[in-house]
Amino acid sequence: MLRGVRQLVGFVARAGADMVVVGSNRHSSLHNLLLGSTSAYLTSHSPTAVLVARAREGAPVVTPQPAAASMTGGGAAR
């Protein structure tokens, strides 16, 4: 987990982003102690502002799906 978050912080710095928006799950303190918290690491180490958002209790969880390559012609949509 930590390696990926460090890479994200580096990417944010290189990209010159104005803000990082990250979701947060409700984990126990023990979970965060043993595994760490991505949002806590970002708020401490990001070179820019970090917005940590939690879904409203009872709201449906929506998982974003990657765009199909055939829909974008194999390249990034602009």
Image (cartoon, grey):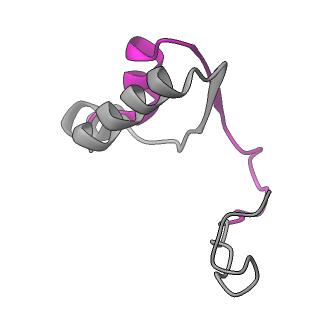
- Residue 70 shown left or right of residue 36 in the figure: right
Depicted 10 relative to depicted 71: above or below: above
Q: Is residue 53 left or right of residue 36?
A: right
Q: Is residue 23 above or below residue 61?
A: above
Residue 34 rendering spot, x and y as whole percentages: 19, 37
Question: What residue do we see at 24% from left, 30% from top?
Answer: 33
Does the magenta run of residues contain 43? yes
The residue under the point 72% across, 45% down is: 55
The quarter of the rendered structure image containing the C terminus is bottom right
Q: Give the quarter of the figure containing the N terminus.
A: top left
What number of labels is visible?
A: 0
Give how far across and how far down residue 8 sits, in percent.
41, 35
Residue 29 percent coordinates (x, y): 34, 31
Query: Which residue corresponds to the image point at 43% horizontal and 42% vertical from the top-left?
Result: 27
Of residue 54 and residue 43, the one placed in the foreground of this image is: 43
Relative to 58, does residue 24 appear above or below in the rendering?
above
Q: Residue furthest bottom?
A: 70
Looking at the picture, tell me which residue is in the foreground, 56 or 9: 9
Which residues lie in the magenta part?
Answer: 36-63
Q: Position of residue 59 (x, y in %)?
A: 79, 56
Residue 30 falls inside the magenta stretch: no
Could you tell me which residue is drawn at 67 percent across and 64 percent down? 76
Quadrant assignment, res 50: top right
